[in-house]
């Protein structure tokens, strides 16, 4: 897949990344090479290959799915410049 300079400029604009005009050609070549490599990956036969979380066979730690307050409210609120009754105090903003 070939990516031209105009496409690189559009991607940079959408990503809100400032790219100088003299860098567009270099980035176009690099992105085209990356896309070619990704296209090569689609040719790999992955039938029968199980998804992995690690190359080492292991069981993931599982915790109970419970809703909690975290148990550290006082530590969190201690970071606030001002608090009251366990809550952050913020300035009232009225437009």
Image: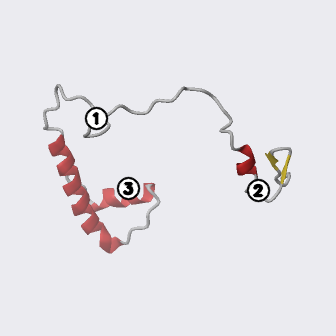
Q: Quadrant of residue 3?
A: bottom left
Q: Position of residue 87 (x, y in %)?
A: 80, 45
**Does 58 sit above or below residue 75?**
above
Q: Is residue 83 visible?
A: yes
Q: Position of residue 17 (x, y in %)?
A: 44, 63
The earlier-in-sequence mark between 3 and 1 is 3
Left or right position of 79 against 90: left
Residue 44 or residue 93, whichever sits in front = 44
**What residue is rendered at 30% in x and 67% in y?**
24
Q: Which mark is residue 80?
A: 2
Q: Is residue 1 visible?
A: no
* Secondary structure of the residue carrying numbered label 3: helix
The span from disc 2 to disc 1 (Cα, nearest Å) is 42 Å
Question: Label 2: how many residues lie within 10 Å, few (<14), some (14-19) or many (20+)?
Answer: few
Question: Label 3: how many residues lie within 10 Å, few (<14), some (14-19) or many (20+)?
Answer: few
Left or right position of 83 against 76: right
Q: Nearer the viewer, mark 3 or mark 1?
A: 1
- The residue pinned by badge 3 equals 11
The span from disc 2 to disc 3 (Cα, nearest Å) is 40 Å
Question: Label 1: how many residues lie within 10 Å, few (<14), some (14-19) or many (20+)?
Answer: few
**What residue is rendered at 37% in x and 72% in y?**
20
Residue 83 or residue 91, whichever sits in front = 83
- The residue pinned by badge 1 equals 52
**What residue is rendered at 43% in x and 59% in y?**
13
């Amino acid at each position: 897949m070939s990516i031209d300079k105009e496409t690189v400029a559009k991607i940079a604009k959408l990503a809100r990344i400032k790219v100088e005009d003299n860098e567009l050609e270099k980035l176009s070549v690099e992105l085209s090479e990356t896309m070619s490599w990704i296209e090569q990956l689609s040719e790999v036969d992955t039938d029968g290959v199980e998804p992995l979380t690690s190359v080492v066979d292991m069981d993931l730690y599982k915790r109970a799915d419970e809703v909690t307050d975290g148990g550290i409210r006082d530590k969190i609120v201690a970071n606030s410049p001002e608090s009251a009754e366990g809550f952050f105090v913020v300035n009232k903003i009225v437009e």
